[in-house]
Image: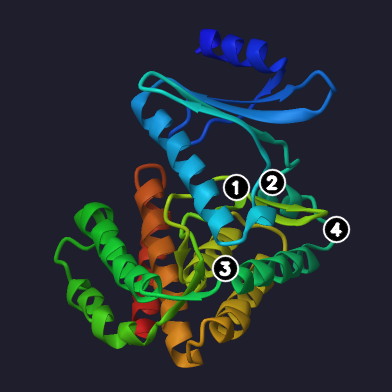
Amino acid sequence: MKSLLDYICKKYNLLVQENLKLGYNSDSVCIAVNKNGDKVVVKAAKTKNAIAEIRMNSTGYDNLRKCGLDFFIPEIFAYESSDDYAFIVMEYLGSNFLYQAEHSENPLEFYMSLMDSLEKVYRVSLKMGAEGHEAVESFIGKTIEIYEKYVCPNLDKERQIFPLLQRMYLSINIPSVVFCCFSNWDFTLEDVYLTNAGVKYSDPHADVLGIPIIDMACFGGLIKLYGLPCSDEGYEEFKKFATGAVAEILRIPTGQAEKIFYLGKLFQCFMSIRFRYEKNPEQTKTIFAEAKEVIEKII
């Protein structure tokens, strides 16, 4: 990895300044400075999964540009990919949303600022297309898959809630969802930046269109899970935004929007169980009880 970083730094006149915390599929992420003293982020990979991650990001950036969302992504200074390595050099965006929220003097106002910026993102990328109802149907399937793999074996061995999960396909009027806009269920606090130029997103998937009501449920749920300042009030504001302004943009009735929001909330509960069961099984029992209450709001 050092040889790859040395190659990048030599080619683009960079000096590594700080190594950053690695993500799930990352080999190396660091802050470097160029010859003008400006900071950039270098993401480099030599393993299969990490190479695929960088390629996915690059495709995501291209697809977001096609949606008119150049303003939503960091500037890309360099990108290379081969069978043996991949790297990307991009704009340094400062502290991420998680850090910003933890240190905000007025966190609720900070959350509202993000929503204001996201509304522009959704309006610019709005289009009519099958991606909307396909995203909802796919997400129900993804939620059931997480249940089958991680929740059922540990907390629901009798599969008591499985029939309820299957009913979600009918309780949500999937064919009625005919519009879509930018969406990524993996829209996490660590990859979002609220800058002077508005919101920026650094870790896109290749598929960039869907129903962001789901994203806002996951995002608001993470704010509560992380125990960020004003988390309860913040969650309610994200719910109000998702089922109000976002639903209006997508022409989705409030009742349907609320069911889709709770679908996102359910997924976030199941993902929390997935990553917390071994370390804190008692906490996951509480999360599972919450998940059962959420299901009732969907069906």
Q: Residue at x 60, y 16 (%)?
A: 8
**Which residue occupies 30% across, 66% down?**
138
Q: Is residue 109 above or below residue 256?
A: above
Q: Which residue is mark 4?
A: 105
Residue type of the residue flagged with mark 1: Asp
- Say whether residue 87 is left or right of residue 158: right
> How many circles with numbers are drawn on the protein?
4
Measured Cα–Cα span from mark 1 to mark 4: 21 Å
Left or right of 132? Residue 118 is right
Q: Nearer the viewer, mark 4 or mark 3?
A: 3
Label 1 crowd bin: few (<14), some (14–19), many (20+), radius 10 Å: some
Q: Residues within 10 Å of mark 2 (few under 14, many from 20)?
A: some
Q: Residue at x 60, y 70 (%)?
A: 122
Instruction: Read off the residue under disc 1.
Output: 191
Q: Work out whether mark 2 precedes mark 1 in sequence or the reverse, and give the earlier one.
A: 2
Q: CA distance from mark 1 to mark 3?
A: 19 Å
Disc 3 marks a residue whose amino acid type is Ser
**Vertical arrangement, residue 96 with respect to residue 167, above or below:** above
The residue lying furthest to the front in this view is 66
Residue position marked by numbered label 3 in the rendering: 125
* Front disc: 3 or 2: 3
Residue 246 image position (x, y, % from top left):
58, 79
Q: Which mark is residue 96?
A: 2
Dot placed on the residue nearer the N-terminal end, 3 or 2: 2
* Neighbourhood count class around disc 3 (C-alpha, 10 Å): few under 14, some 14–19, many 20 upward: some
Image mark for residue 219 = none
Using the image as rendered, state which of residue 188 and residue 3 is in the foreground. 3
Task: State left or right for residue 60 relative to residue 231.
Answer: left
